[in-house]
Image (cartoon, rainbow, N blue to C red):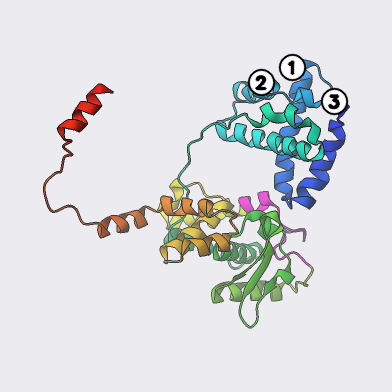
Amino acid sequence: MTTSQCDIARHLKHFLTEYLPQVQGRSLHTVRSYRDALCLLLRHLQEKHGIAPNRVTVGDFSAENIMGFLNELQRSHKNGNATRNLRLAAIRAFAMYLQRKEPTLAGDLTSLLAIPSKRTTSKVLGFLTRDEMEAVLEAPDADTWSGKRDRALFAIMYNTGVRVSEITGSLVSDVTLTPSGVFHFRGKGRKERALPLWKRTVTMLRKWIAANHLRQEQPLFANARGQAMTRSGVEKRLREAVRKAGKTCPSIRAKRVSPHTLRHTNAMHLLQAGVDVTVIAMWLGHESIETTHRYVTADLELKEKALKTLQPPSGGAFRFRPDDELLKFLQLL
């Protein structure tokens, strides 16, 4: 098969609508991210090279064209290295899919797959202290319908460390409140997890469900219209809670708090309580333990405790003194 004979449009549709969500179990968020990256690439090829999207061939996916696209993102769209790498990851994923579907095209895609990612600076994870988290949990007005919902919402997010997409997609049937509280949910990549709930969280959820006469098939947390809360809705309610929390806990004012911050906070507090990092990885649904190790590097308190266990040397400063043969060798290099 030649590069011109490969139906890129057909493969793109199958890649996004069937392969990613059904075969690989990718989340809707990931599928949309890949779709956006590939759409940007097709527009770039059309605007810069005059190639209509329905006429794109594998040959158009050359390393030169892809590099031009990535450079354009950073030059004109002011994308950082992290965003550039995400776009490249989407293109690579599609190229690898093409290799599986059309093995004869492997040689045409080799140069594309060899494009390296750019190095990025890892940011220190943001999380809340116990006092700050308590202030957020107490901020919503317990005398209003939305305040009661928000208290239960933030309590279960902190208790379980779920992603915002996981909590907005949860139903009443996902929660078991007797004899002890358990939250069942479908995580990233359609992985199912079950996490225990604190008695405080169970009490709040039981009152919330009973007061609203919620049925098993209804959303656990709905908006004022009775529909499941959206990501933006959760973010808005959390911003309001943080604003109120700042009145009693001034330290939180200097922090940027998002729904994912509650996930980080859950992980950090588990780590500080002595929970093994491998258990935290399973708790959060991380595919790689390396992802969870970021919490270890972010916890300054743990580093200080580790330093205290290491006693300083009792003698004076020690300087390495090479023998004459080593000095001669080094001088000849």
**Could you say whether the residue bearing mark 1 is in a helix, strand or loop?**
helix
**Which contiguous range is marked in magenta?**
218-235
Tell me the number on the disc at residue 2: 3
| Amino acid at pointer 2 | Gly
Residue 228 shown in magenta: yes
What's the distance in space between the residues labelled 3 and 1, CA to CA?
Answer: 24 Å
- Which corner quadrant holds the N terminus? top right
**Magenta span dominant secondary structure:** loop
Badge 2: how crowded within 10 Å, few (<14), some, or many (20+)?
some
Q: Which of these two is toward me, 63 or 171?
A: 63
197 over 57 or under it: above or below: below
- Which corner quadrant holds the C terminus? top left
Residue at position x 47%, y 42% in the image: 123
Query: Mark 1 — residue?
Result: 48
Quadrant in which residue 206 is drawn = bottom right
- Tell me whether circle 1 and circle 2 mark residues in contact (CB < 8 Å): yes
What's the distance in space between the residues labelled 1 and 2, CA to CA?
Answer: 9 Å
**Could you say whether the residue bearing mark 2 is in a helix, strand or loop?**
helix
Mark earlier in primary sequence (2, 3): 3
Mark earlier in primary sequence (3, 1): 3
Q: Which of these two is toward me, 150 or 124?
A: 124
98 over 152 or under it: above or below: above
Query: Mark 2 — residue?
Result: 68
| Amino acid at pointer 1 | Lys
